[in-house]
């Protein structure tokens, strides 16, 4: 976090918390589930983010489940269809509890992004409704505030539906985001050499401590070379956007390079909810530049989270990792101590 972000974080925190100490009486936040119906990881991340944000802002949360999923990952592109059961299965698993019952009579407002100034305006507008009035704010994106105050996700960790396994052995999960990323946003790809260097650094420290461990690789790969087009299921063609076609070839990702890791199990093209559960219960989680990774990290109750910087900021207890896979050994030992205690 740079100086500007620290200054903004401090100023906003003092201003908002000084002005609004008491919980909001006639205002609630809920997820605008019809505004950005992309992948299940991104949507559940926003859902839990909004729940965490409501506690941080002292505004009650009302749960709204996912409506639909329009991005189905690599399998949807390759098969040109999205798993029809995914929404119901996700809603059964991920349901942050409501703080209140929504009054039958209420006003509704939808906001694409919530800022601290926007939250203050909502509180003032709700107060103007007077006795018996109630305002439900439907929010799409909670990240503008949470990326300044990522430790607000402690509430998400507390209510996680997942429980870690006993230790040892330690289960080290690598989320290697591949799949369709070469076509969608190749700048987000972390190279294999980063994951391998980090994994070997972790293994060397654990070997010295005589702590048993095993590795898991979680990724998506095409089952065959195929041309991905942006009108395929899970990637609808946007109005005015020209047709784009990208060749995806499983050989391009060179996943065999990970075979050098000891005691490695591969989870390739696994059901997304199963993958999420395994990542969110790993003892050491190596994240990628992905909402799926970030969600797994904030839902993980005990793990050492190895984090490479991207736009979503880390919680304070996470382990920052450099581009070459290096990290501060003292920070790792402290995080490992918390895991093993």
Image: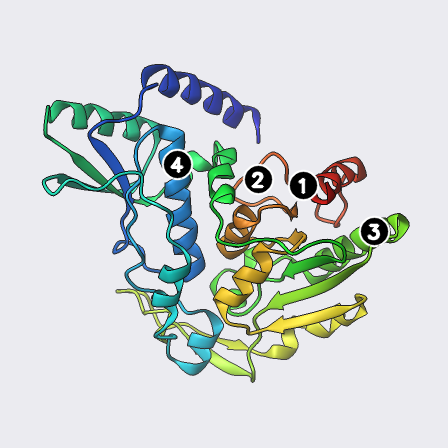
Which residue is at a point 49% across and 67% down the rendered structure image? 272
Residue 258 figure quarter: bottom right
Label 1: which residue? 320
State if disc 4 and disc 3 touch (CB < 8 Å).
Answer: no
Q: Nearer the viewer, mark 2 or mark 3?
A: 3
255, above or below 4, in the image? below
Residue at image location 34% in from the left, 28% down from the top: 58
Q: Are marks 2 and 1 in contact (CB under 8 Å)?
A: yes
Q: Residue furthest front?
A: 166
Disc 3 crowd, CA 10 A, few/some/many (<14, 14-19, 20+): some
Q: Is residue 252 above or below residue 279?
A: below
| Mark 4 nearby-residue class (10 Å; few <14, some 14–19, many ≥20) | many
Question: Does residue 266 appear to the left or right of 332 in the view shown?
Answer: left
First-in-chain label (2 vs 1): 2
Query: Alpha carbon of mark 2 to alpha carbon of mark 1: how far?
Result: 8 Å
Give the SS element for disc 3. Answer: helix
Foreground: disc 1 or disc 3: 3
Please give the residue where the numbered disc 2 appears in the rendered image: 314
Circle 3 is placed at which residue position? 206
Q: Nearer the viewer, residue 102 or 273?
A: 102
- Please state the horizontal and vertical placement of residue 175, each as a whole percent of the image: 61, 60
Instruction: Please give the residue where the numbered disc 4 appears in the rendered image.
Output: 53
Q: Quadrant of the N terminus?
A: top right
Who comes first in sequence, dot 4 or dot 2?
4
> Would you say the residues marked 1 and 4 are in contact, meaning their CB atoms lie under 8 Å apart?
no
Label 2 element class = loop
The answer to whether 40 is drawn above or below residue 295 in the figure is below
- Mark earlier in primary sequence (2, 3): 3
């Amino acid at each position: 976090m740079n100086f500007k972000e620290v200054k903004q974080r401090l100023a906003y925190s003092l201003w908002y918390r000084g002005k609004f100490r008491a919980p909001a009486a006639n205002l609630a936040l809920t997820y605008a589930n019809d505004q950005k119906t992309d992948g299940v990881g991104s949507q559940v991340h926003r859902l839990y983010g909004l729940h965490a944000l409501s506690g941080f802002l002292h505004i009650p949360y009302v749960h709204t489940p996912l409506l639909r999923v329009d991005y189905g990952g690599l399998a949807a592109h390759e098969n040109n269809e999205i798993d029809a059961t995914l929404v119901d299965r996700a809603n059964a698993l991920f349901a942050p509890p409501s703080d209140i019952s929504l009054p039958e009579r209420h006003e509704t407002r939808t906001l694409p992004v919530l800022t601290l100034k926007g939250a203050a305006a909502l509180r003032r507008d709700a107060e103007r409704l007077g006795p018996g009035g109630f305002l439900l704010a439907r929010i799409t994106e909670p990240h503008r505030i949470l990326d300044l105050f990522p430790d607000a996700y402690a509430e998400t960790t507390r209510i996680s539906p997942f429980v870690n396994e006993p230790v040892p052995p330690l289960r080290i999960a690598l989320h290697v985001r591949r799949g369709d990323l070469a076509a969608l946003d190749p700048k987000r790809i972390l190279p294999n050499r980063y994951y391998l260097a980090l994994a070997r650094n972790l293994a060397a420290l654990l070997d010295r401590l005589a702590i048993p461990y095993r590795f898991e690789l979680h990724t998506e790969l095409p089952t065959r070379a195929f041309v991905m087009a942006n009108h395929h299921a899970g990637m609808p063609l946007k109005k005015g956007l020209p047709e784009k076609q990208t060749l995806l070839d499983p050989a391009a990702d060179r996943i065999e390079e990970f075979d050098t890791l000891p005691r490695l199990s591969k989870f390739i093209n696994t059901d997304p909810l199963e993958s999420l559960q395994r990542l969110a219960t790993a003892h050491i989680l190596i994240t990628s530049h992905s909402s799926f990774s970030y969600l797994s990290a904030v839902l993980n109750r005990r793990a050492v989270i190895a984090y490479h910087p991207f736009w979503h900021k880390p919680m304070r207890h996470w382990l920052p990792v450099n581009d070459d896979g290096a990290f501060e050994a003292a920070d790792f030992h402290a995080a490992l101590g918390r895991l093993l205690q």
